[in-house]
Image (spheres, helix red, strand yellow):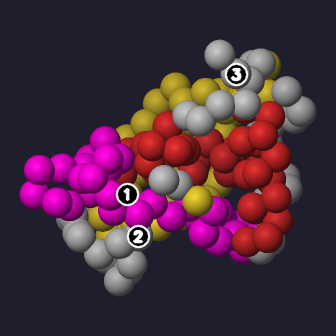
Amino acid sequence: MTIPSNKQQFEEFYNKFMERLGFDDIVATLGLTPHDADGESVSMAMPLTDAVAQANGMFSAAALFGAADITGTLLSMQAYADSGQFPLAVQSSQNFMSNSKATPAIATARILRGGSSVSVAEVIVRDETGKDLMHSTFTYVLKERKLGR
């Protein structure tokens, strides 16, 4: 299991992955960027923009879900997916705790359990003040997948 121990390592992994992907996906829409890594977890930051806001100007549930899933996917990919494998979400559970206009939202993922074919990640999304916005778990199956369209 190789989880980045600092933000620089996480950024290097993220940039290589996005380069291999070859097109802007939902990560670009959400405005996600690497925030932190500590060897046990990784975090992505999502700014509050019109594209991710609901009608009252707070984060939309869909955007919070996306930030959580993408952060969990990237963590599972680093921790367990061998070269050429990609984590596919097969189960998820979300609890939306609160909402906020305090930006950015920070999604922090950690592995609960993992191995050669399955990874389970817990992701907590908080606003910039540390207020819990969402708690979630994701189960990913590690499958051979070619990146791109």
Please name the residue shown 70% across and 21% down the image.
Answer: 148
Using residue 81 as the reference point, say whether residue 62 is left or right of it: left
Label ID, residue 148:
3
Q: Secondary structure at mark 1?
A: strand
State the residue position of label 1. 135
Q: Nearer the viewer, mark 1 or mark 3?
A: 3
Question: Which label is found at residue 102?
Answer: none
Name the kind of residue labelled 3 in the image. Gly
Q: According to the image, label 2 marks what residue?
A: 104
The relative height of residue 61 versus residue 82 in the rendered view (above or below) is below
How far across and how far down the image is residue 129, in percent? Answer: 35, 83
> Which range of residues does the magenta coloring cover?
34-63
Q: Looking at the image, is mark 2 or mark 1 earlier in the sequence?
A: 2
Q: Amino acid at mark 2?
A: Pro
Q: Position of residue 81 (x, y in %)?
A: 80, 37
Residue 131 vs 75, above or below: the answer is below
Quarter assignment of residue 134: bottom left
The image quarter containing residue 130 is bottom left
Residue at position x 87%, y 35% from top?
Answer: 82
Is 50 covered by the magenta stretch?
yes
Q: Is residue 101 left or right of residue 79?
A: left
Q: Under tag 3, what secondary structure? A: loop
Residue at the far right in the pictured view: 83
- Answer whether residue 117 is visible to the viewer in this image: no
Q: Mark 1 packing: few (<14 Cα in 10 Å), some, or many (20+)?
A: many
Q: Nearer the viewer, residue 130 or 128?
A: 128
Residue at 46% in and 67% down: 106
